[in-house]
């Protein structure tokens, strides 16, 4: 049996929409902001994808740390929306729908994450995904602000 749940967050930044789309739609750059990513390899695009990647995260379970590699596809990239989906065995998917809009000179980035996983894995997978994406959200506004200033992203 597969369980599914969604969480969301919002980030605001003073950067151009183009800078935000460039960072958020290029999964090879997500290691700059995603706390679990340790490696990203670009792959030939899968059918229906604009770009595909093999991404390795470093996960922790108690005192143990272990790498997990999964495939991720960028499905939609417009000025207003980015949609990605990541797939990991056995039967786990993470769908990310990001919407961008400007409000009073500030870019608003609304992110909705939906995770589906087999029931025995769901609790761990959902906790890891939510913690990682909320940590990413804490970093993202500052990273986008640095992009608009012409400064380096990392740091």
Image: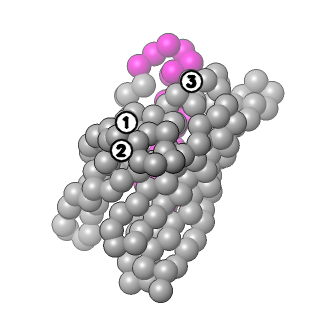
Query: Viewer-proximal residue, 69 or 6?
Result: 69
Callout 2: SS: strand
- Residue annotated with mark 2: 53
Vertical relation: 110 (above or below) 102 = below
Question: Residue 91: image x %, image y %?
Answer: 40, 72
Instruction: Report which residue position mark 1 lands on.
Output: 28
Q: Looking at the image, is mark 3 or mark 1 earlier in the sequence? A: 3
Q: Which mark is residue 19?
A: 3
Q: Is residue 114 left or right of residue 87?
A: right
| Nearest to N terminus: mark 2 or mark 3 | 3
Q: Residue furthest bottom?
A: 1
Q: Is residue 133 magenta?
A: yes
Q: How is the image coloured?
A: one colour
In the rendered image, residue 107, in percent from the top left (x then y), is placed at 69, 31
* Image position of 88 with respect to 48: above or below: below
- Magenta span covers which residues? 130-152
Q: Is residue 136 magenta?
A: yes
The answer to whether mark 2 and mark 1 are in CB contact below 8 A is yes
């Amino acid at each position: 049996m597969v369980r599914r749940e969604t969480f969301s967050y919002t980030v605001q930044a003073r950067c151009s929409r183009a800078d935000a789309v460039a960072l958020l739609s290029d999964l090879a750059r997500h290691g700059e902001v995603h706390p679990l990513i340790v490696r990203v390899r670009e792959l030939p695009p899968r059918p229906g994808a604009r770009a595909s990647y093999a991404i390795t995260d470093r996960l922790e379970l108690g005192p143990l740390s272990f790498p997990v590699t999964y495939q991720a596809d960028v499905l939609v990239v417009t000025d207003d929306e980015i949609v990605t989906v990541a797939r990991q065995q056995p039967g786990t998917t993470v769908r990310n729908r990001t919407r961008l809009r400007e409000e009073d000179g500030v870019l608003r980035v609304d992110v909705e994450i939906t995770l589906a996983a087999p029931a025995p894995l769901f609790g761990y997978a959902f906790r890891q995904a939510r913690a990682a994406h909320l940590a990413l959200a804490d970093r993202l506004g500052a990273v986008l602000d640095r992009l608009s200033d012409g400064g380096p992203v990392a740091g």
